[in-house]
Amino acid sequence: MKLVKKTNKGFQYELNQEDVHSLRFLLKQFPISALSRVAISKTDTEAIEREKLLNESLAAHREELKRKAQNLASADKFKVSGGSQSYSISLEAREAMLQILNDIRVESWRSLGEPENLEMNILNLSKEKVRYYHLMHVAGYFEYHFLNLEEGGK
């Protein structure tokens, strides 16, 4: 994956077929876990009402991100260009992409038990945990590239 062009309206990237497949697959996985409800208080009536509003707001935000993830993964976003594919993304869509990728990465890490060492032996993991391990690393790969390519990273 490499940055082809950066303008004040957005970014254009060149992706190989493996990157296209991986990014589309990853975005289609969102959200990878159920939304955890926030608990503020069990007794304070005002706090319970604020908790309800907060949880409703979080659920609505997550639904909006899910719609954005589906849109970002749509086939029409990728244009064949020689042996690779071009992917154009606006500044706003890039921010949504980064939120989605970060959510996938963090939720995968939580599903793995919040390990301090991210380079674990996958042979010791269950099939479900191996899935989260790979999702975490692939999301991190794309996060790195979306964050660093426009800064001159590789």
Image (tube, rainbow, N blue to C red):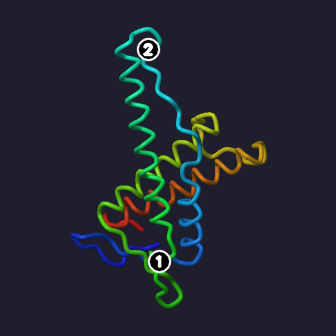
Given the image, on which type of amino acid does mark 1 rest? Asp
Residue at 47% across, 77% down: 76
Asked if the residue under mark 2 is in contact with the one under mark 1, i.e. CB atoms within 8 Å, the reply is no
Given the image, on which type of amino acid does mark 2 rest? Ser
Left or right? Give the position of 44 relative to 19: left
Image location of residue 1, percent across then percent down: 47, 72
**57 vs 16: above or below:** above
Residue at 50% across, 67% down: 73
Image location of residue 59, percent across then percent down: 45, 40
Residue situated furthest left in the rendering: 8
Left or right? Give the position of 11 relative to 110: left
Total numbered badges shown on the rendered structure:
2
Residue position for label 1? 76
Residue 3 versus residue 58: which sits nearer the camera?
A: 58
Image location of residue 57, percent across then percent down: 38, 37
The residues tagged by marks 1 and 2 sit, at their Cα atoms, a distance apart of 46 Å
Q: Earlier in the sequence, mark 1 or mark 2?
A: 2
Quadrant in which the C terminus is drawn: bottom left
Q: Secondary structure at mark 2?
A: loop
**86 vs 99: above or below:** below
Residue situated furthest top in the rendering: 43
Residue at 49% across, 81% down: 85
Crowding at label 1, few (<14), some or many (≥20) Cα neighbours within 10 Å? few
Residue position for label 2? 41
